[in-house]
Amino acid sequence: MWPTPLLAFWRRLTRLLRSPIVLLLLLFGWLLLLVPDSRMPVDVVAPQEQTSTPGSWKDNSVRSYEDFLRKVLMETWQRPSNFSVGLLSNVSRHREGEGVEATDIRDQIYFLNAVQKVWNEERFGAVSPDTVVFLIQVHTRRHYLEYLIDSFRAVRGIEGALLVFSHDYFDSEINALVQSIDFVRVLQIFYPYSTQLYTNSFPGQDRNDCPWDMKREKAMQMKCNNAEHPDLYGHYREAKYTQIKHHWWWKIHRVFDGLRVTRNSTGLVVLVEEDHYVVPDILHVLGIFELARKQHCAHCNVISLGTYMKSVNFASDSGRVEVCPWIASKHNMGMVLRRDNWEEIKSCSDNFCNFDDYNWDWSLQHISSNCLKNKLVVMMARAPRIFHIGECGVHHKEKNCLSDKVLSKVRQLIASSKDQLFPSKLSLVRTSRRAMKMPKGNGGWGDLRDHWLCLHLINATLL
């Protein structure tokens, strides 16, 4: 007979081991033994890409790995059950200050990035090479994200598309919201170098980083990080801003070159953000835009479905398209990229990553002016199919960031213009606007570590 304390311990241990979360973590831990380094992103390549000797253990390891992940998802994460949502909730308590380590979140992110689960695929079929992808950059503004998802629900033909949500913050409520979508195929990816994961070290804000407004001479005396390389204006990096450019760069590389369902695709990729709102005929308009581009504007290499015009008139502009040189401040919303666009942009990665501007759009403007063989020329919808509804963001703050004033105006405009939606043809309006003179960068990107990380993101095969 065992002593009473030992028996009690044994009973508690067996109850713990029966927990599904503990079993999953144990299986995941065993899986990590098969992976060279669980702290660094590792791509999961297809079995035919293996170069090991046929019949060896390594020859079958990837197939077994993928089969295991697929089995876990099919049995326990087919829908966002209490178990899966609970697991995500436990992991994301780091945000709420409940003591979960960033390394735990990092492990979950690498796990989910390896799985690449496409939700609702069993209902709407597999992703095809020409499937339209909406690539949505998500931070923490769940309030706006709900409205964006609601607007996608009203899009005609949305069941044939794929929504890829690219997160730089791991949050249980946002994960549950995304996984609750039931009207379209959905895939989540997680930027693996976020400030959430690296709270006190680069790429986050290192404790020894030079303060933003410190003079170079003082920084050199303090010997703080990157003291020798402030930006154009004498300022040092702020991680919360540099992350946006890194994330934008990573997510596009991830979709075109990394994800198993899209890395060989020929379809269009529409860039969306969490505080955008789409119009019900966006897929219809995108289709006739691309047809018009092929037939009448072959040199147009970018489509822009959003605009910052103060007044919008669907009655006169629903089918009108403006063709002009691409300008960062005017044509950065609702950009549509093709694979050939991306290959050209990627060939200028040195220019993009080393240009002293923390904004991805002005960095893109820089490579258009200084590197691309074919400068960016845009086809812009005069009546936008993507609206910006955010009251607050990186560059501006309002007194009430949860205000729905802009949202209400957009909804009223769409409702009053329903008879002008789904145009049957387009009218191209070519403007004589000259390509803008490229200004110097906006700074915020002088740190050599950011240059290196940016280039690493594009040259490495990442999860």
Image (spheres, rainbow, N blue to C red):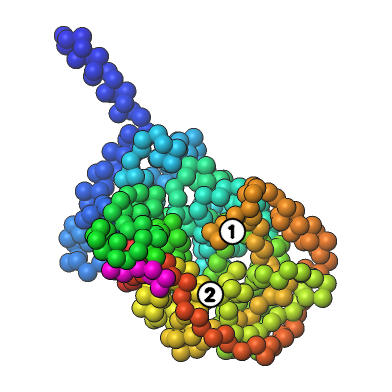
Q: Position of residue 235 (x, y in %)?
A: 39, 65
Task: State left or right for residue 228 relative to residue 431.
Answer: left
The residue located at (26%, 43%) in the rendering is 29
Of 141 and 33, nearer the camera is 141
Residue of label 1: 396
The residues bearing labels 1 and 2 have C-alpha atoms spaced at a distance of: 27 Å
Q: Position of residue 218 (x, y in %)?
A: 30, 61
Q: Give the residue type that dot 2 points to.
A: Leu
Between disc 1 and disc 2, the foreground one is 1
Q: Position of residue 92 (x, y in %)?
A: 43, 41
Q: Give the residue type that dot 1 points to.
A: His
Q: Residues within 10 Å of mark 1 (few under 14, many from 20)?
A: few
Residue of label 2: 337
Q: Which residues are magenta?
A: 228-234
Task: State left or right for residue 119 relative to residue 59.
Answer: right
Task: State left or right for residue 147 relative to residue 426.
Answer: left
Q: Position of residue 325 (x, y in %)?
A: 59, 85
The residue located at (72%, 75%) in the rendering is 382
Of 317 and 359, nearer the camera is 359
Res. 87 in view: no
Magenta span dominant secondary structure: loop
Of 143 and 258, nearer the camera is 143
- Tag 1 near tag 2, CB within 8 Å: no
Callout 2: SS: strand
In which quarter of the view is residue 292 placed?
A: bottom right
Q: Is residue 111 magenta?
A: no
Of 228 and 171, nearer the camera is 228
Q: Earlier in the sequence, mark 1 or mark 2?
A: 2
The residue located at (68%, 67%) in the rendering is 385
The residue located at (44%, 56%) in the rendering is 240
